[in-house]
Image (cartoon, grey):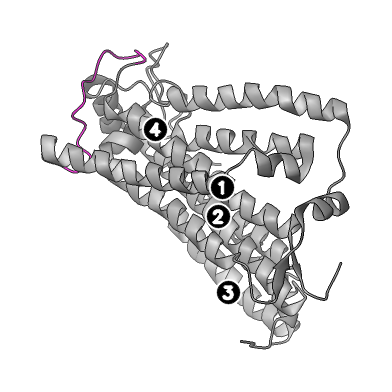
Amino acid sequence: MSRRLRLAVFGLGAVLTGALLVIAFTGLPEFGTSHHPYGDRAVHTAVDEQKTSNAVSSVNFDQRAIDTMGEEFILFTAVIGTLVLLRELRREVEEGEVETELRRSPRGLSSTAYLTYAMLGVTTLTGLYVVAHGHLSPGGGFQGGVVLGTAIHLLYVGGGYRAIRKARPLHLYEIFDALGAGGFVVLGLAGAIVGGDLLANVLPLGALGDILSAGQVELLNALVGLEVASAVIVILARFLEQYAEVRIQGTAR
Amino acid sequence: MRMLLFCCAGWLLLIGCYGIVVSRNLIHTVICLVVCQSSTYLILLGIGYRSGGTAPVFSDTSPSTVVDPVVQALCLTDVVVSATVIALFLALALQAHKQHGTVDPDELTSLRG
């Protein structure tokens, strides 16, 4: 299909879709409306019944925790997908690591290196804080997990590929990833045995706003944090490896 | 005025699709898909907005009007799906480049085993 024809087809489709969208938008509830029946019930359940300060976390890890389980397995599947897609092909050889690093990523300034090492601690602590307070304040396992997964890559900025490779035993993170995903299911099944429903919140709820409140919400957050951090590390490791290590035989770039 | 936010979302969707149609680089295509997906954040958060509402978090304050937490939870799912889709598509783009030596979708016409 020529580019012009393709644009014409797109133009027609875009005009029609746009018209349909505008018609659909007129049927939506008014912007800023005070009528939120689901929202009101979710907030009531979160605060008054489940003692969870962060209503969003309550929806994610208590009221609709089963959806989050599916979400976690989407991420898990993506990790497996990336591992499969970026596997070593037959035509590729892995070159020696030292030589590759010298060629591809020269060492940065030592002041940059010291700054990134200092920031590594701060960033890791921030990530842990965000995970640990998922039931109290905005944040949680997904957000904190991304911060934790990114933190370790400061080593790459400061010390190059060799530094991050040394600090990152990949098989361990693959196991952590599986543990995070599996732990979610185990906790869900435990809830089913004790409470009668999959992922039923059977742990003591505590008082609203306490660090030990909201029952299973924080435990699930921690498991998700573990999984997300490991997933980020494993996926980025695969991409970094492609960049720094694998070359196609005979096509030196 | 009340339609502005929703129309912005529709515009993001269509402009993202336009980008995909005219794209000359697979990485650009992936970014355009992310633009398309951003429209869903706008729709979700727009539907959940309550005039004068704040975040539905009750740790140290007890706000009287809060926005809808259900759509915010949906948004989180949306972001996670977006991130995984980006990772997989970028991996595909990388392999396409390795196999065919190009990231221009128009030149990726041959099927090779």
| Chain identifier of the residue bearing label 2 in the image | B
**Residue at (29%, 23%) from the top-left corner?**
A214
* Crowdedness near tag 2: few (<14), some (14–19) or many (≥20) residues, C-alpha within 10 Å: some
Q: CA distance from mark 4 to mark 3?
A: 42 Å
Distance between the alpha carbons at the discs numbered 4 and 1: 23 Å
Picture quarter with the C terminus of chain A = bottom right
First along the sequence among labels 4 and 1? 1
Secondary structure character of the magenta stretch overall: loop
Disc 4 to disc 2, C-alpha distance: 25 Å
Q: Residue at x 34, y 34 (%)?
A: A220
Is circle 4 on the same chain as circle 2? no
Location of residue A12 in the rendering, given as x and y in whole percent from the top left corner: 61, 76
The residue pinned by badge 3 equals A13
In magenta, the rendered stretch is A197-211
Q: Mark 3 against mark 2, which lies toward the viewer?
A: 2
Res A29 quadrant in image: top left
Name the spot of residue B112 as percent of width and height, x first.
Answer: 64, 87
Name the secondary structure under disc 3.
Answer: helix
Q: Which mark is residue B37?
A: 2
Residue A24 position, x and y percent, is 44, 58
Q: Which of B84 and A124 lies nearest the eye of the viewer?
A: A124
Instruction: Give the chain letter at badge 4.
Output: A
Q: Is residue B69 left or right of residue A123?
A: left
